Image: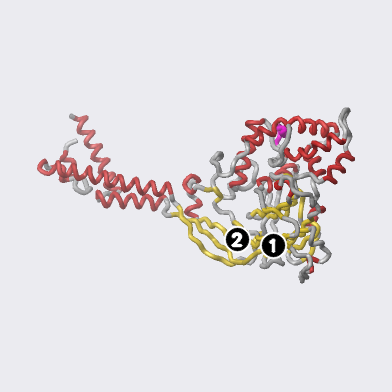
Amino acid sequence: MSTRLLEQAQFHGAKRLVYPRHRKFWIFTHILIFCCSTGVVWETVTRYLSNPTYMVQMTAVKTWVTFPTVVVCPEINVPQEKILQFLGRIKYPPGVDATYVESIIWQLGAFYSRDVTFETADLESIQRILEFNDMDVETAGAMLTSTCEEILIKCKWRGKNITCSSLFRMEMTSYGFCCVFNGRSLKREMKNPGYNKKQAVQKLHVSQVGPNRGLIVAISQNDTRPPINTDLYYKWISLKNNGFYYVEMLSNGTPVPIASEIWAGFSTKGIHIADEVRYLSRDLRRCRMTDEPLKYFPEYHRTYCLMECEMARIMERCNCTQLQHPVLPGVRQCGARDIQCVRSSVVPFGAGVCNCPMTCDRDIQISMPSSFRIYPNLPTIDSFYEGLDLTRISIVRVYLQNVNKMIFSRRSYFTHFNLFAQLGGVFNMFFGCSILTILEILILLWRAADSALGN
C-alpha cells in the first residue's frame, strides 16, 4: 500500500509515516503505543471476565420471616423394644430363627445411614427375610425406628401448645428416618401421581421475636444404655436455613444430650441481584438463580445440584438408586451387594467433582445453637415444663432472634455497554480513534488492495 494513502488517515501520527525523515521514529512509536493499548485492553477484558460483580451490604426490617426447616432425628441404633416387636410380627423362613435375626437386624440401618457398619452376607440374609415377608427395606426400617409420637412428647408453636403429630412428619432423609417440621421430601412428592414440579408450596412464617414465640419441642430421652458408638446412640437436630427445605440433602446437625436445653435463635440475610447482574451469562456471574430448575428439583440450590450429581454417579457406577433418593422409572433400588459401591460414589461437598456453582439469590438464615443443662430441682416459671420428667427429656427452642435482615446486593462493575465504552476510551487515548476511524482504515485497506490488483 502506498504511504501516500496514510495522508487521509485520521488517527494520531499516521501522516508522519508518509515522510521518510521521521518514519522510523513514528513506526517505533506506533508499535510501542499498540503494545501499550493491547496491554490495557487485555487487563480491562480480563477484569471483566474474572470479577464482573461486587457485593453491597444493606439492612432492612422484616415484618415476617420464613421459619427454617427443623429436623429431629432419633438414634440410628435400633431400640431393643422395637426389635422385639419386629421379631414378633414377621414370619421366619426355614432354618432361620428369632435369635439369628435379632443378632443381625441392627445392620439394616446400613441401607440408609453411612455410619452403620455391616457385613454383606448379613445384609443379604436380611433382604431374603424381608422378601419372605413381602416387605421392603423402607417399611422394615420404619418399623424399627422410634416414631415421631414416641420421641416428641410436647410441642409449642408461636406461643400455643399443639400436638407434635400435627407439626412433624416422619420422612426419609439422607441420614435415615427423621421427624421434619416445615420441610418437604422430593422422594415422597415424586411418588404422588399428581406430582407437578412447579407446584407452589405453603411455607410457615414467624413475625415475633423471642424464645417463646417460635418452636419449642420436648424430646424423650428414654434410652439410658451407655453409648457404644456415639454417632449411633444420640438424637440430633438440624436446622436448614432456606425455609421448607428438601430433606434428601440433609447435613449432620447438633447432638441433643439428655437433660439439656438447646436454644437456636436465628436471623436472616438475603442476596439481592441487580438487573445488570441477572442478565449476565451464568459463567460470568458464577452462580445460578433459584428459578433455574434442575432435572428433578423445581428450584436451584447447590446442595440439590450435588444430590442430583450424586444420584447420577451412583446410577452410572452401581446401576441402582439409593433408598433415600427418589424412585426413578426403570432404575432398581440398591441392594446389599451395592452398599459398598454406593458409599464409594458419594459426592464430597466442595470437592469439585460436580459442576454446581453457588446459589445467587437465596435467603439464608444464620443460627448459632447454644446448650445448657436442665436442673430438675430448680423451679420453672414456664408452663411448658409442667408434667415433664426433666431427668429424661431434652428441650429444643428455635426462634427468631431479631427482625433486622441483612441484604447483600450483588451488582455489576460494568455491563457490556460499559465495557465497549471503556475499550473505546482506551483506543481514543492512544490513537485518537473512533468508529469513523475504523471505517476509514477499512476504506484505506480496500483502496490499497484495489491499487495492488490494478498494478
Q: Is residue 195 visible?
A: no
Q: Is residue 332 magenta?
A: yes
Of all residues shown, which one is farthest toward the top? 94
Q: Residue 372: which numbered mark, if any?
A: 1
Coordinates of residue 455 in the picture (x, y in percent): 18, 29
Q: Which residues are magenta?
A: 328-335
Disc 2, SS: strand
Q: Looking at numbered disc 1 in the image, what kind of residue is underneath it? A: Phe
Coordinates of residue 323 in the picture (x, y in percent): 72, 39
**Residue indicated by mark 2:** 268
Q: Answer left or right for 354 relative to 106.
A: left
Q: Residues within 10 Å of mark 1 (few under 14, many from 20)?
A: few
Disc 1, SS: strand
Q: Is residue 180 or residue 185 the one in the foreground? A: 180
Residue at point 77% right, 57% down? Answer: 219
Model colouring:
secondary structure
Q: Residues within 10 Å of mark 2 (few under 14, many from 20)?
A: many
Q: Residue 253: which numbered mark, if any?
A: none
Residue at point 33% right, 47% down? Answer: 41
Q: Quadrant of residue 189?
A: top right
Residue at point 44% right, 51% down? Answer: 52
Q: Earlier in the sequence, mark 2 or mark 1?
A: 2
